[in-house]
C-alpha cells in the first residue's frame, strides 16, 4: 500500500508545476494545424506552376519552407525542398536541384510512400540529365518500390527508365519500359503522358535507325500534340522528322521540318530545340553541297549559342544570390528556435530535479535486479555448457552418417552420367545418319527438311540436357558461387519468351508474362536464367498444341513467389514425390516425343536452394503442372549521398 501512495505522490509532484504549460499547448496545437494547412496550400500552388512559371513557383516554395521550418513541420519541409528542386530542374540547374531533392528525402516521412516515390523519380531523372546513368537507375528502382501499385507513379518511373536505357543504347529495355508505361497511361487515360511516350519511342527507333517505326511513332506523337496543344512535344517531333529525312537522303524535307521546329520553339522559348534545329539546317545544306546556306545557318547557330552563354552567366549569378538568401532565412529561423529552446530549458529545470530523484530510486531497484539477473545467468550458462557438450556428440554422429551418404551420392553420380551419355548418343547418332544418307544421295533436300522438323525437338532436348550436364557437373567439381544482383523477373520473362519463340510457335503455345514489373529479387541472374530456361522447356515439352504457359509473381511478406504454370499432361502424386531426388529421378517423353534425363529439375532445385529459396510443384493429371519457388525481394538502401555531383 505504501508503494502505491509514493507513486501517486511523485506523479502529483511531476504534474502540478506544469499544468499551465500543458493548457497552453492546446492552443499551440490549433495554431500548428493552421500553419500546416497553409504550408500544404502553398506547396500545391508551387507544384502546379513550376513548369510554366518556375521563378514564381520558387518564391512560393521558399515561403512554404520558412513556415514549415518555424512550425517544425517535417513533411511540409520535405515537400517544399522537393518543389524547389523541381523549379531548378526545370531551368536546367541540375546540380543545385540535386541538393534540394536530397534534402527533401531527409524530411519526408516513411509513411508517405507516394511522395517518396516522386522524390526518388525526380532524383533519377536529374542524374540522367547529368549522364550519371548508374545512379539514375538506382534512384528509379527505389522510386518503383515506393510507387507500389499506383499506376500513375509506375508509369512516370518507367517512362524515365526508358529514357535512361535509350541513353545507354540498351534499346530493347528502353522499348519494353516505354511500352509498359504506355499501357499504364492508357489505363488511367493520361493523354499528355501518352503523347510524350509515343515521341520517346519514335526517338528510340530513330537511334536504332529503324526509320519506318520512328516515323510511325512520331506521326502519332505529332497528332496527339496538336490535339492536347503540347507545343513543346510538337517542336521535338518536327526535330525527329528532320533527322529522319536527313538520314534517309530527303534533305529538302529535313529543311522544312527544321524551319517549322525553329518557328514553334521560338514562340515558346525552348532554346535547346532552336539550337538543335539550326544544327540540323547546317547539316542538311552541307549534305546538299549548298555551302552558302550552310555558312549562313552556322553563323545564326553561333550567335544563339553566344547569347545563351551570356544569359546562363546572368542566371547563375541570380541563382547564387537566391541560394544564399534562402540559407540566410533558414539560419534566422533556426536561431529563433535555439533562443526558444533556451527559454524552454529554464522552464523545465524543476522537472530535471524531480527526474534526478526518481532516477536515484530506480537505480537502487536496478542494482537489485541486476544482482538477481547475474545469478540466474550463471545457472543458465552452466546448463548451456552441458547442452553444447551433448550437441557435439550429436554432430560427431552426424558427420559419420554424412560420410556414408557421400559414398552413396558418388555412386549415384556415376550412374546418372552413364544414363545421360546414352540419351545424348541417340540424337547425335540420328543426326549423323541423316547427314551421311544425304551425302550419299539416299535422301533429297525435301526429305532432310521434313526429317529436321521431326528431329528438331529431340535435338533441342539434347542441347538443354548437355547444358544442364555441364552446369551440374562443373558445380560438383568446383563448387558453386553466387553473384547476387537485383533481377527484374518481368524483363527476364520477356527474354525467355524470345529464347523459346520457335518452340512456342511450333506447338502454337500461348506464353503469358504476368510477372510484376519493377520488383527485383536478390539472386544470381545466370542461375535464374538456368532455372527459368529448364522450367519453361519442360512446360513446352509436356504441353499439347495450342496450350498455355504462364509465368507469374506474387509478393508475400519480404519474398517474391515466382511460378511457371502449364496446361500440359500433368503428373501423378507418386511421380511428383520422385522429381527432386537423385535416387528416384526419372524422365518421360514429351507430347512430340521430346527426350530428357530428369537432371534439369535436380539442377533447378540446387540453384533455387543456393539462392535462398525452395522449389515446389503442384500437378494434376491431364490438367497441367505449376512449379513455383520463393526468393528474397531487393532490400532498398535509404542512405543518401549528401555530395552534389
Image (cartoon, rainbow, N blue to C red):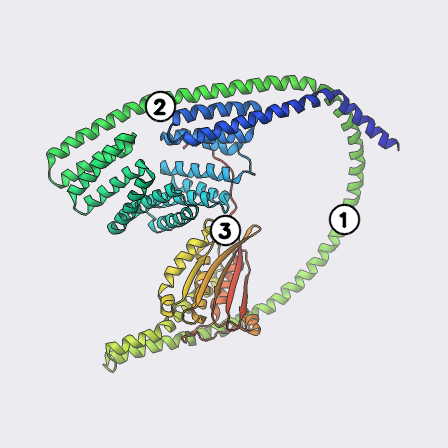
Q: Which residue is mark 1?
A: 380
Query: Of circles 3 and 2, which is in front?
Result: 2
The kind of secondary structure element at disc 1 is helix
Which picture quadrant has residue 199?
top left
Circle 3 residue: 522
Quarter of the image where the C terminus is located: top left
Residue 28 location, quadrant: top right
Disc on the earlier residue, 2 or 1: 2
Counting residues from the N terminus, which is met first, the one under dot 3 or under dot 2?
A: 2
| Spot occupied by residue 264 in the image (x, y as percentages of width and height) | 26, 34
Quick one: SS at disc 2? helix
Mark closer to the observer (2, 1)? 2
Above or below, 529 against 408 in this view is above
Q: Is residue 476 visible?
A: no
Residue visible at 76% across and 28% down? Answer: 359
Q: Going by the picture, which residue comes out furthest to the front?
A: 227
Residue that carries the numbered disc 2 in the rendered image: 316
How far is the residue under mark 3 from the one under mark 2? 43 Å
Left or right: 191 with respect to 44? left
Residue 21 is tagged as none
Contact between labelled residues 2 and 3, with CB atoms less than 8 Å apart = no
In this orientation, which residue lies closer to the viewer: 23 or 176?
Answer: 23
Left or right side of 13 for 33: left
Badge 3: how crowded within 10 Å, few (<14), some, or many (20+)? many
Q: Is residue 45 above or below residue 577?
A: above
Question: Would you call the spot at circle 1 few (<14 residues within 10 Å), some (14-19), or many (20 or more)?
Answer: few
Q: Earlier in the sequence, mark 3 or mark 1?
A: 1
User: What's the residue at 43%, 72% (across, down)?
Assistant: 544
Q: Position of residue 215 (x, y in %)?
A: 25, 48
Amino acid at each position: 500500500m505504501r508503494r502505491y501512495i509514493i507513486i501517486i505522490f511523485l506523479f502529483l509532484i511531476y504534474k502540478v508545476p506544469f499544468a499551465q504549460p500543458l493548457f497552453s499547448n492546446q492552443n499551440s496545437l490549433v495554431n500548428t494545424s493552421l500553419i500546416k494547412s497553409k504550408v500544404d496550400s502553398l506547396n500545391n500552388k508551387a507544384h502546379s506552376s513550376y513548369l510554366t512559371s518556375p521563378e514564381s513557383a520558387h518564391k512560393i516554395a521558399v515561403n512554404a519552407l520558412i513556415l514549415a521550418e518555424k512550425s517544425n513541420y517535417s513533411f511540409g519541409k520535405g515537400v517544399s525542398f522537393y518543389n524547389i528542386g523541381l523549379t531548378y530542374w526545370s531551368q536546367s540547374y541540375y546540380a543545385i536541384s540535386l541538393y534540394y531533392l536530397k534534402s527533401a528525402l531527409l524530411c519526408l516521412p516513411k509513411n508517405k510512400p507516394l511522395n517518396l516515390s516522386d522524390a526518388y523519380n525526380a532524383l533519377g531523372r536529374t542524374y540522367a540529365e547529368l549522364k550519371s546513368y548508374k545512379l539514375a537507375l538506382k534512384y528509379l528502382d527505389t522510386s518503383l518500390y515506393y510507387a507500389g501499385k499506383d499506376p500513375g507513379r509506375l508509369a512516370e518511373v518507367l517512362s524515365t527508365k526508358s529514357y535512361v536505357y535509350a541513353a545507354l543504347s540498351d534499346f530493347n529495355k528502353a522499348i519494353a519500359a516505354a511500352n509498359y508505361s504506355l499501357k499504364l497511361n492508357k489505363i488511367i487515360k493520361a493523354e499528355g503522358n501518352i503523347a510524350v511516350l509515343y515521341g520517346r519511342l519514335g526517338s528510340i527507333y530513330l537511334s536504332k535507325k529503324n526509320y519506318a517505326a520512328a516515323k510511325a511513332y512520331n506521326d502519332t506523337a505529332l497528332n496527339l500534340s496538336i490535339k492536347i496543344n503540347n507545343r513543346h512535344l510538337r517542336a521535338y517531333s518536327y526535330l525527329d522528322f528532320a533527322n529522319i529525312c536527313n538520314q534517309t537522303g530527303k534533305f529538302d524535307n529535313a529543311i522544312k521540318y527544321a524551319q517549322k521546329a525553329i518557328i514553334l520553339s521560338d514562340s515558346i522559348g525552348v532554346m535547346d530545340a532552336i539550337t538543335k534545329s539550326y544544327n540540323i539546317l547546317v547539316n542538311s545544306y552541307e549534305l546538299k553541297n549548298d555551302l552558302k546556306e550552310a555558312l549562313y545557318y552556322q553563323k545564326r547557330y553561333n550567335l544563339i549559342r553566344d547569347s545563351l552563354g551570356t544569359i546562363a552567366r546572368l542566371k547563375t549569378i541570380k541563382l547564387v544570390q537566391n541560394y544564399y538568401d534562402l540559407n540566410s532565412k533558414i539560419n534566422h529561423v533556426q536561431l529563433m528556435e535555439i533562443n526558444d529552446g533556451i527559454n524552454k530549458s529554464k522552464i523545465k529545470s524543476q522537472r530535471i530535479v524531480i527526474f534526478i530523484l526518481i532516477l536515484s530510486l530506480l537505480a537502487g531497484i536496478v542494482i537489485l535486479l541486476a544482482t538477481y539477473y547475474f545469478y540466474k545467468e550463471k545457472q543458465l550458462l552452466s546448463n548451456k555448457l552441458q547442452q553444447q557438450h551433448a550437441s557435439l556428440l550429436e554432430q560427431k554422429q552426424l558427420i559419420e552418417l554424412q560420410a556414408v551418404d557421400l559414398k552413396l551420392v558418388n555412386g549415384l553420380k556415376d550412374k546418372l552420367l552413364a544414363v545421360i551419355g546414352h540419351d545424348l548418343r541417340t540424337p547425335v547418332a540420328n543426326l549423323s545418319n541423316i547427314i551421311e544418307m544425304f551425302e550419299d544421295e539416299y535422301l533429297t533436300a525435301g526429305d532432310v527438311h521434313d526429317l529436321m522438323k521431326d528431329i528438331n525437338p529431340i535435338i533441342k532436348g539434347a542441347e538443354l540436357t548437355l547444358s544442364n550436364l555441364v552446369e551440374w557437373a562443373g558445380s560438383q567439381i568446383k563448387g558453386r558461387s553466387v553473384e547476387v544482383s537485383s533481377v527484374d523477373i518481368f524483363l527476364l520473362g520477356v527474354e525467355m519468351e524470345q529464347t523459346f519463340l520457335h518452340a512456342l510457335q511450333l506447338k502454337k503455345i500461348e506464353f503469358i508474362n504476368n510477372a510484376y514489373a519493377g520488383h527485383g529479387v536478390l539472386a544470381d541472374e545466370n542461375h535464374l536464367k538456368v532455372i527459368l530456361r529448364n522450367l519453361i522447356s519442360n512446360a513446352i515439352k509436356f504441353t499439347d498444341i495450342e496450350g498455355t504457359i504462364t509465368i507469374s509473381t506474387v509478393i508475400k511478406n519480404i519474398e517474391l513467389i515466382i511460378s511457371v504454370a502449364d496446361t500440359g499432361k500433368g503428373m501423378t502424386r507418386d511421380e511428383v514425390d520422385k522429381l527432386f531426388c537423385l535416387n528416384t529421378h526419372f524422365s518421360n517423353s514429351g507430347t512430340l516425343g521430346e527426350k530428357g534425363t530428369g537432371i534439369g529439375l535436380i539442377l533447378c532445385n540446387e540453384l533455387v536452394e543456393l539462392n535462398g529459396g525452395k522449389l515446389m510443384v503442384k500437378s494434376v493429371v491431364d490438367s497441367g503442372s505449376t512449379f513455383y519457388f520463393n526468393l528474397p525481394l531487393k532490400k532498398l538502401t535509404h542512405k543518401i549521398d549528401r555530395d552534389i555531383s
